[in-house]
Image (cartoon, rainbow, N blue to C red):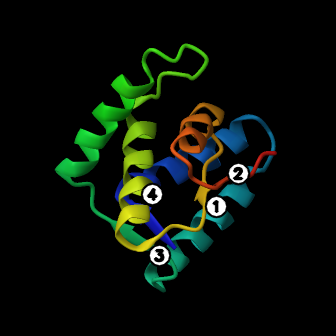
Amino acid sequence: MFYLRLTVTEVQRAFAQLVRTNEISADEATQLRGSFYHDLRARRLRVIRIQTYHHHTAIRLFYQYLPQRHLPLLRTAAAIQLAGALRLREAQGLDYFVAADGSLCKIAEAENLSVIKPKD
């Protein structure tokens, strides 16, 4: 499984959001964080550095979908995440794109990615 380095930060935010909304306890978040970092150390997850290419693709995504008012305007971090997934698909294939952000998922689907949204 591959992640952009930005994903490491995004995952931490997701854990914090789950605690804030009382979906999990602070102790459970600590356990999840420990498991996540264990998987990173064990190289079960491969972290990819953000490159200039990802920024250029994110900008393309902003303007490509701008006229399509039924689709959301991506946030910067989400656009970079999606750019990373598109690059992976191009370079070596990508089975699924996983994201909890509904807006991000809509654009990922518009880019013909197979999307898994965990909260569904």
**30 shown above or below 62:** below
Question: Which label belongs to residue 26?
Answer: 2
Q: Are marks 3 and 4 in contact (CB under 8 Å)?
A: yes
Point 67% across, 66% down: residue: 31
Residue with the mark numbered 4: 8
Labels 3 & 2 near each other (Cβ < 8 A): no
Image quadrant assignment for residue 36? bottom right
Depth order, front residue of 40/67: 67
Splitting the image into 4 quarters, where does residue 56 fall?
top left
Q: Residue at x 52, y 73 (%)?
A: 1
Q: Which mark is residue 30?
A: 1
User: Would you name the residue on which mark 3 appears?
Assistant: 40
- In front: label 2 or label 4: 4
109 on left or right of 24: left
Q: Is 113 on the left or on the right of 117, as rendered?
A: left
Badge 1 element:
helix
